Amino acid sequence: MTAWLLLVAMAIAAPEPEPSDATVVYYNARMALRDGHALEAVQLWLLRNAMEDKSGQVSPQDGDFRSVTWAALGELGLCQDGYAKDADGVGLWPLALHNQVVRGLGRGKPGKRARPFAAFEVNRQQRFISITDVLGSRELATVKLSRGR
């Protein structure tokens, strides 16, 4: 009986394993979206792409991460075209698509379009990216999102 209690006490006192880097990125994206920082959530998805490209590993919550990214894109009013639906996540893609359509119907001031060739004036080249691209650390730090056509 004493051995059984000792075993239970050791199991309870055992430290929880550290989450992987990919899981920490996912948690940060969820918190960013919760706190209203949709652009940061999309940037963390791009970081996830780089981590997957380098290590081949993603977090166990990758399906939910896809849903977070869908919701963030919808919150920003950006089109999710070319981004696979989050079928194995929490299923937020209809909401994100709805948000994008509603924002597109408004008659607000048009957003500022990216000017790739203006980058030559400051010795920094710009390029259009996709939500599936892998970016370097300098590119990730300066990424700007704009509505497509």
Image (cartoon, grey):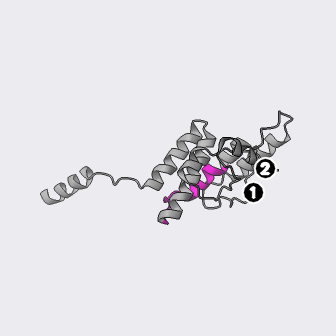
Residue under numbered circle 1:
81
Residue 4 placement, left or right of 89 = left
Q: Is residue 75 magenta?
A: no
Q: Is residue 96 above or below residue 3?
A: above
Mark 1 lies on a secondary structure that is loop
Quarter of the view holding residue 2:
bottom left
Q: Is residue 57 magenta?
A: yes
Q: Main secondary structure of the magenta part?
A: helix
Q: Tell me the residue at 69%/52% (across/down).
A: 127
Residue 7, given in percent of the width and then of the height, sits at: 20, 58
Q: Amino acid at mark 2?
A: Gly
Residue 107, given in percent of the width and then of the height, sits at: 86, 35
Quarter of the view holding residue 104:
top right
Report the quarter where the N terminus lies.
bottom left
Estimate how packed mark 1 is, as few (under 14), some (14 to 19) or many (20 or more) residues with alpha carbons within 10 Å. Answer: few
Give whichever of 55, 80 is nearer the camera: 55
| Dots 2, 1 in contact, CB < 8 A | yes
Q: Residue furthest top?
A: 109
Residue under numbered circle 2:
148
Give whichever of 2, 143 is nearer the camera: 143
Q: Residue furthest left?
A: 2
Q: Residue furthest bottom?
A: 56
Mark 2 lies on a secondary structure that is loop
Magenta range is: 56-70
Residue 118, given in percent of the width and then of the height, sits at: 74, 43
Tally of numbered discs: 2
Mark 2 vs mark 1, CA separation in Å: 10 Å
Q: Tell me the residue at 60%/57% (across/down).
A: 89
Q: Tell me the residue at 63%/46% (across/down).
A: 143
